[in-house]
Image (spheres, grey):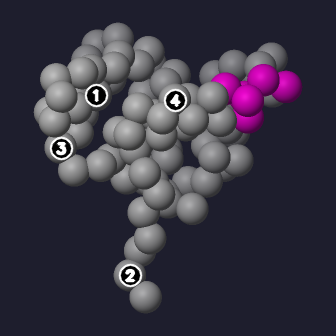
Amino acid sequence: MTFALVPGVSVADTENGTVLLDERNGRYWMLNRTGAVVLRCLLDGESPEETAHTPLRRFPDAADQATAHVDSLLDALRTAKVIAPWAAGP
């Protein structure tokens, strides 16, 4: 499954991570560097399972928690309605 930011949500990289701004209601979310990497992987078309492997290159001791952390972030972004499944063309 591929994900995309919903219309009206912008993203800005900072030196400490990424900020998402929901221009529809003025709310924003700050993601740390690891969260920013996870978001980029998801937006680049990686599955949550594939995405979980990316941070492990930096934090190999977190293998048992990586998938849960990715799922938690994805759930939070979906609940906030800033990211949604996106289906590529036919």
**Apparent side of residue 23 relative to residue 18 in the rendered image (left or right):** left
Q: Are marks 4 and 2 in contact (CB under 8 Å)?
A: no
| Secondary element type, mark 1 | strand
Identify the residue at horizontal 38%, vertical 81% (top origin).
Answer: 89
Q: Earlier in the sequence, mark 4 or mark 1?
A: 1
Q: Are marks 3 and 4 in contact (CB under 8 Å)?
A: no
Q: Amino acid at mark 4?
A: Ala
Give the foreground label among 3 and 2. Answer: 3
Relative to 76, say whether 2 is above or below.
below
Q: Give the image location of residue 55, x and y in percent.
A: 62, 29
**Apparent side of residue 9 relative to residue 45 in the rendered image (left or right):** left
Residue neighbourhood size for the residue with mark 4, other residues' Cα within 10 Å, grouped as few (<14), some (14–19), many (≥20): few
Circle 3 sits on which residue?
Answer: 8
Q: Are marks 1 and 2 in contact (CB under 8 Å)?
A: no
**Apparent side of residue 78 relative to residue 19 in the rendered image (left or right):** right
Residue 76 visible (yes or no): yes
Q: Which region of the structure is painted magenta? A: 64-69
The numbered dot on residue 89 is 2
Identify the residue at horizontal 35%, vertical 11% (top origin).
Answer: 16
Residue neighbourhood size for the residue with mark 1, other residues' Cα within 10 Å, grouped as few (<14), some (14–19), many (≥20): some
The one of 51 and 88 positioned closer to us in this rendering: 88
Q: Quadrant of residue 27?
A: top left
| Quarter containing the C terminus | bottom left
Residue neighbourhood size for the residue with mark 2, other residues' Cα within 10 Å, grouped as few (<14), some (14–19), many (≥20): few
Q: Earlier in the sequence, mark 1 or mark 2?
A: 1
Residue 31, magenta (yes or no): no
How far, Cα to Cα, is label 4 from label 2? 26 Å
The numbered dot on residue 55 is none
Q: Amino acid at mark 1?
A: Leu
The one of 23 and 15 positioned closer to us in this rendering: 23
The numbered dot on residue 76 is 4
